[in-house]
Image (tube, helix red, strand yellow):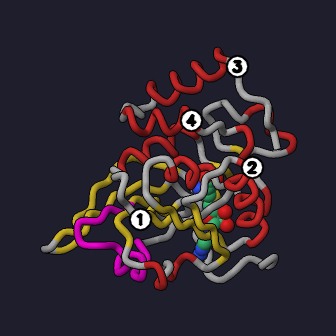
Amino acid sequence: MNDAPPSAETRMQFLFALRSRGVTDARVLGAMESIDRGPFVRGLFSERAYEDMPLPIACGQTISQPSVVGVMTQALQVNPRDKVLEVGTGSGYQAAILSRLARRVYTVDRHKRLVQEARQIFEALDLVNITALTVDGSFGLPDQAPFDRIIVTCAAEDPPGPLLAQLKIGGIMVLPVGQSDTVQTLIRVHKAEDGLHYDELRPVRFVPLLEGLGKDA
Ligand code: SAH
């Protein structure tokens, strides 16, 4: 774990990059200021933790670019009483940010190793309102459904049906959709009384949502 806190200058540059790329919501910026990205980036790339770029993590996955985390979190419009599901724990960074904004965060990944490592960081940072589980998130988390908010940080061709079903009426889901190796689109789904409403937010690039558990699980 890279535990050295960033310098004041690094911190300022980090926040400046977020603002200049469209992250303007004060609660989201506050949450991102309160959680250092350093502990979530291990090994070779730890020195680059405060740059606005995606970085490799274990199991061939990536920790998302901070400004993309910010834009997605902002689009999710999380309220303090919300129960949130994240599909794609990865490093745990996005879940940690969400834990500052929501009542309860469930985060799932198909790789057991990633879930275990993320849990250790949540514990070290005393983020007690996150539950991290090793499951195939394409089926959501029926035991804990319905959710006020759902965020998916891996790309599917279409929004998975079980996730749409596990969203409350009035709920919001943010996810990348599209073919895995081309440009994908970040979309926001709002589940209203009269059905689902879709908004296209911006082009993004995420690792694919894969069916089944990872080999390490
Ligand atoms: N949100 C993460 C980045 C996620 S990278 C962060 O903040 O670091 C995408 C993650 O989605 C990977 O860890 C991958 O293992 C996971 N993933 C892919 N398909 C999945 C599935 N069906 N269920 C759960 N997790 C999945």
Q: Nearer the viewer, mark 2 or mark 3?
A: 3
Lower sequence index among marks 2 and 1 = 2
Does residue 48 show up magenta in the picture?
Answer: no
Q: Nearer the viewer, mark 3 or mark 4?
A: 4
Q: Which residue is mark 3?
A: 7
Q: Which residue is mark 2?
A: 56
- Give how far apart the Cα atoms at labels 4 and 2 are: 23 Å
Residue type, mark 1 in image: Lys
| Ligand 1 positioned in quadrant | bottom right
- Give how far apart the Cα atoms at labels 2 and 1 are: 29 Å
Q: Residue at x 56, y 51 (%)?
A: 94
Image position of 52 with respect to 180: above or below: above
Does residue 172 show up magenta in the picture?
Answer: yes
Say what secondary structure mark 3 lies in: loop
Image position of 4 with respect to 193: above or below: above
Say what secondary structure mark 4 lies in: helix
Residue type, mark 3 in image: Ser
Which region of the structure is painted magenta?
A: 159-173
Residue type, mark 2 in image: Pro
